[in-house]
Image (cartoon, rainbow, N blue to C red):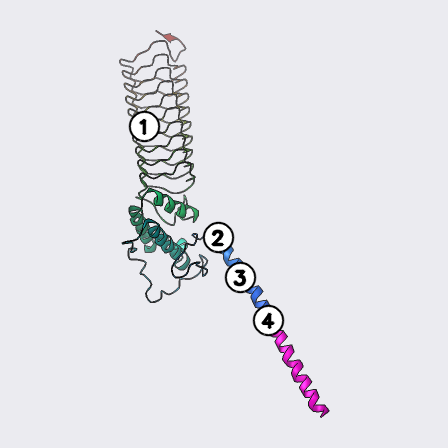
Amino acid sequence: MHMLKGKRFYSTKLFWGSLAVLVIVATALTQVQGMINGLTEIASADEPFPRRRSPSPDLADRLPPSQPSQPSGTGTQDRSLPLHTVGLSQPEILEKYQNYIYELVTEENLKQLQVSDPLRNTAKAQTLAILEQLDGTYRSQLLTFLVDSNLVAAENPTVSLHGGNFSNTDFSDRSLSNINLRGANFSDANLNQTDFSQTKLFGATLDRSDLSFANLSNAELFRASLKNANLFLATLTGATLQEADLTAADLFLANLQNTNLNKTTLTNADLSFANLSQAELVFANGRDANLSFVNLSDASLSGADLSRSNLRGANLSNANLSGTNLSNADLTGANLSNANIVGANLTGVILFNTTMPDGTVQN
């Protein structure tokens, strides 16, 4: 009988001991799982922000960008096919697009794919197609989504926006700095006080856009179109505007110090009171431009065409005007002290109260 009680006691003790071990193991597993979830959140910090998706409202099953692709289940839409948006409202179209991009990043490793990968081209095509379906408000939100998700970085963007339509969109007082917007269309857009510093706008269209007070310092605007754009008091220091088209653009009081304007079209543009000191305007076309009281000190205008331009009161001291066409230009009250005018065309030029390169005043 004593032995039986001992066996029962041992069995009971073994039971509770085993149960305690199971509790400890379960607790440890919970803690480990918590650590894994924490690390997953850190690894996923650069993913697109999750949007509500039916039937899973919180998208709690996020995957880090390094996670291998998961096999598509039955009924999953082929990601190479156009997104079905017929009958959807603007918010619904945007939400569907965001979920689509989110899945490409988390399930297809979009950020790690080579630039030549077909899925990159598919993502671009879907983006351009959706932009055409959205109005200005939701186009703005789409770009914000891509910027916040680090998908349009200045170098090697994950989603190319070349040809993207952002016309008539309001981006005023927004930061679009250091991103890639090459070839995008911002015609007639409100870009007042927008920060485009260090942004790549190679070949972008900004015709008739309002860029007043905008920051375009060190921006890449090579071959960009800014015809009739409003750049009143804009900052373009160190920007590249080579071969850009600024026909009839308003650059009144703009700061273009150290800016590259080589071969740029400035016909009929208003650059009065602008700062172009140390700027490069080699072979620039500034016919009929308003350059009154402009600061062109130490600027290089070799081979530029400034015929019929208004240079009244302009500061051209130490400027390189060799081979520049100044025919029929108005240089009344201009300062050309120490300027290089070798080979310049001065036919019909108006020189009244003008300070010549040798310091004499021409009346």
Of callouts 4 and 2, which one flags the residue occurring earlier in the amino acid sequence?
Answer: 4
Please rate how many residues cluster around mark 4, counting C-alpha atoms within 10 Å: few if below 14, some from 14 to 19, many from 20. few
Q: Residue furthest bottom?
A: 1
Q: Measure the alpha-carbon separation of dots 1 and 2.
A: 42 Å
Q: Which mark is residue 36?
A: 3
Element at label 2: loop
Q: Amino acid at mark 3?
A: Ile
Q: Is residue 118 visible?
A: yes
Q: Amino acid at mark 1?
A: Ala
Q: Amino acid at mark 4?
A: Val
Of callouts 1 and 4, which one flags the residue occurring earlier in the amino acid sequence?
Answer: 4
Q: Which mark is residue 45?
A: 2
Q: Residue furthest right?
A: 2
Residue that badge 4 annotates? 25
Which of the 4 quarters of the picture holds residue 19?
A: bottom right
Q: Which mark is residue 249?
A: 1
Which of the 4 quarters of the picture holds residue 362?
A: top left
